[in-house]
Amino acid sequence: MPSPSHQPVIGVTLDREPAGGYSKFPWYAVRENYMDAISHAGGLPIALPHDDRVADAYMDLVDGLLLTGGAFDIDPGLFGQSQHKSVETLKSQRTIFELTVTRVALTRDIPVLGICGGEQLLNVALGGSLIQHIPDKIAGALAHEQPNPRNQPGHSVNILAGTILHKIIGVDKIEVNSAHHQAVAEVGPTAVINACASDGVVEGIEEQTRRFCLGVQWHPEFHVSPSDSKIFVAFISACRG
């Protein structure tokens, strides 16, 4: 078993963009603060290119998996729904890779942290479904795509008592940032909800039988609240084994 001083290797999923902008050829991207948050919590982040054929090999190399967010939607066909008119951007190669590598991690009980779209991806991997467009499903919904900068809070979230997330954070309510128009609908059969917004939107899920399997709808890598750092510290601690 690794020692408490062991620096866990954390595989970080990447976004993928077509040619244009940064490069005249297709390119990968990841926001710097994802990597910084892992490093500051004691982990060693490495990037995972989108090749689902080597998902097992990737998981041989890492002690934990971080599923990042992105400005796109998961194909509704993957959770048995037809596509809503609001769903315009799909990234099939990324989604297939992330589902594959997540399922390998879950099978091996490798710790997983899903952030924003990564939380939604984790829920689909666990057999759950998504709300494709919050305003069409929840009357009077909060501004989950907040107009102010992402490094500022957008609304509060209630943390459910008795959950792993509540044990990690130690408080009943926190302020979070918010950048999504989709959300968890039905959780996977083995998952539970650990956080909700005041309008009822699911803001976090977890699977309590594994070493660490947690998803949050907000972006803790921005450290809007002191609780955000606690999430990364708990994740890296679990990855030490």
Image (cartoon, helix red, strand yellow):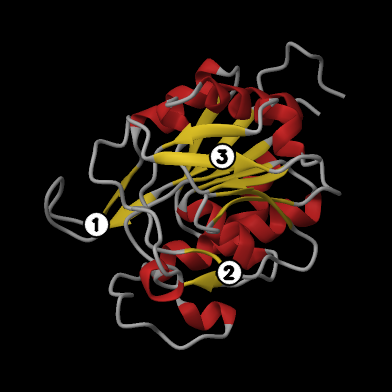
Give the image location of residue 96, x and y in percent. 51, 68
The residue lying toward the viewer, choosing from 40 and 29, is 40
Query: Would you name the residue on which mark 2 appears?
Result: 185
Give the CA separation, mark 2 to mark 1: 33 Å
**Comparing marks 2 and 1, which lies closer to the viewer?**
2
Query: Would you name the residue on which mark 3 appears?
Result: 11
* Label 1 residue SS: loop
Work out whether mark 3 precedes mark 1 in sequence or the reverse, and give the earlier one: 3
Residue at figure coordinates x 55%, y 78% from the top left = 78
The residue lying toward the viewer, choosing from 48 and 130, is 130
Q: Type of residue at label 3?
A: Gly
Asked where in the image residue 65 lies, by quadrant, the reply is top right
Work out whether mark 2 precedes mark 3 in sequence or the reverse, and give the earlier one: 3
* Label 3 residue SS: strand
Give the image location of residue 153, x and y in percent. 37, 33
Q: Extreme top residue here?
A: 5
* Label 2 residue SS: loop
